[in-house]
Image: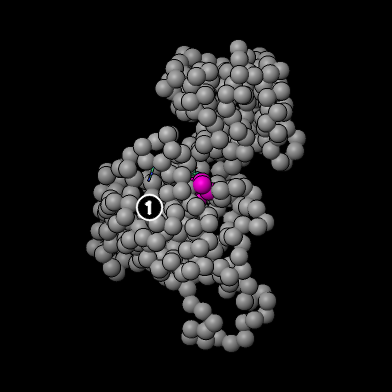
Amino acid sequence: MANNFRVFATCDIGPALDVLRERGYQVEVYPDPTAPPKSLIIDKVRSGVDGLITTLRDQIDAEIFEAGKGTLKVVAQFAVGFDNINRADANRYKIPFTNTADVLTEATAEFAFFMLGAVARKLWPAEHLTRENRWSFWHPYLPFLGDEVTGKTIAIIGTGRIGLAMIKKCAGFDMNILCYDPAYQNHEYVNAIQETMDLRHARGIQKEKTWIKYVSFEEALGQADFVSVHVPLLREGESNTPTYHLFNERTLKTMKPSAFLVNTSRGPVVDENALAKALEENWIAGAALDVYEKEPLPADSPLRSPAIEDRCRLFPHFASAAKITRLSTDPNKGMAGRCVQGLIDVLEGNYGGDVTKMPYVVNKEAF
Ligand code: NAD
């Protein structure tokens, strides 16, 4: 197959790029592991590339689309989240952009669950105790105890793909589940989870009866032992229910003092200054974060305060960072495979060239 499309990838996404090369594409990859400056992306786009492969580190907006006027045909984002892409600008310039939904759903949900376990059962302070040779006796409750996860109540904020996958994992730990989502409520899924809970109880697989239901945001926060966040970052003007600083002083105070917050969504969904204060002043019991208002997390972030380090777990935007999930060239398994397939669909005019029929294109409304 002879294609001489030109593609610039702002980051090396692994062997999936060879799929493009094998099809005859000219693929240029920004060689540094850090993000390229925006000016460089603009220069590459202006030089006439047909496709751009981007990550969440790249700000993609009118400046980029203007530079690619008449030549740039697609932006393929290596992520499900696309808050770094200005959708209104993409639509104005009629440039389709794709994402890598679904293939990272289970990996992200399982990591959210592991983060929850890590902060609740004090894995980090417990390992430090052992490694630093401060474990000098076995004792029923000294030097500290953790909080069980089994049988507790979790609030799932955002019941899209990852929220629903998290529900499935939590149901396996005999948890009660409060769901909140103002825009999308999957009652069929929730009913099916309730049926599996009832069956597990009836067959003696779990001792206590458990339940799942949709509730208001306030009820979810007020009743949960754990709150796990699975929303996209939506700023004021982008949604009727924006998620920017959804967790702030007021909403954090709504949570129980014994509750834990887990955030694998996007950093700006949580007001970090408010969260640091909430942890310092014990409004909540702990937090586990994978994403931050500014990434990488600045050296002077209040979240690094030694006063809260035993109950504040910090991870490097790592929830989807598993081998098959990130790098598989199979579009049904890996982000890389899906990213490249989204690009191919647009450039090679798959689906009869109808962008609205292409499964990985996000901004179908522009076409
Ligand atoms: P999705 O679109 O399937 O689900 C998001 C859900 O959030 C939707 O159902 C939506 O209705 C809901 N929502 C929107 N506004 C809300 C609000 N104000 N309150 C509550 N719910 C609201 O997306 P997804 O595939 O489940 O991914 C969710 C987000 O997770 C992504 O947008 C991305 O930012 C983030 N993510 C992070 C990582 C990571 O590595 N940490 C990996 C994957 C995804």
Q: Is residue 256 left or right of residue 117?
A: left
Judge whether residue 49 is colored magenta: no
| Residue 332 x, y percent position in the rendering | 50, 35
Ligand 1 visible in quadrant: top left
Judge whether residue 265 is colored magenta: yes
Q: Residue at x 52, y 70 (%)?
A: 122
Q: Is residue 101 left or right of residue 160?
A: right
Residue placed under numbered mark 1 in the picture: 156
Q: Residue at x 58, y 18 (%)?
A: 73
User: What amino acid does circle 1 point to?
Assistant: Ile
| Residue 135, quarter of the rendered image | bottom right
Q: Nearer the viewer, residue 209 or 76?
A: 76
- Give the residues drawn in magenta, as a range: 264-268
- SS class of the residue under badge 1? strand
Q: Nearer the viewer, residue 258 or 163?
A: 258
Tell me if residue 70 comes above or below residue 365 in the rendering.
Answer: above
Q: Is residue 192 left or right of residue 293?
A: left
| Residue 339 x, y percent position in the rendering | 57, 31
How many tags in the picture?
Answer: 1
Q: Residue at x 61, y 19 (%)?
A: 66
Does mark 1's beta carbon lie closer than 8 Å to ligand 1?
Answer: no
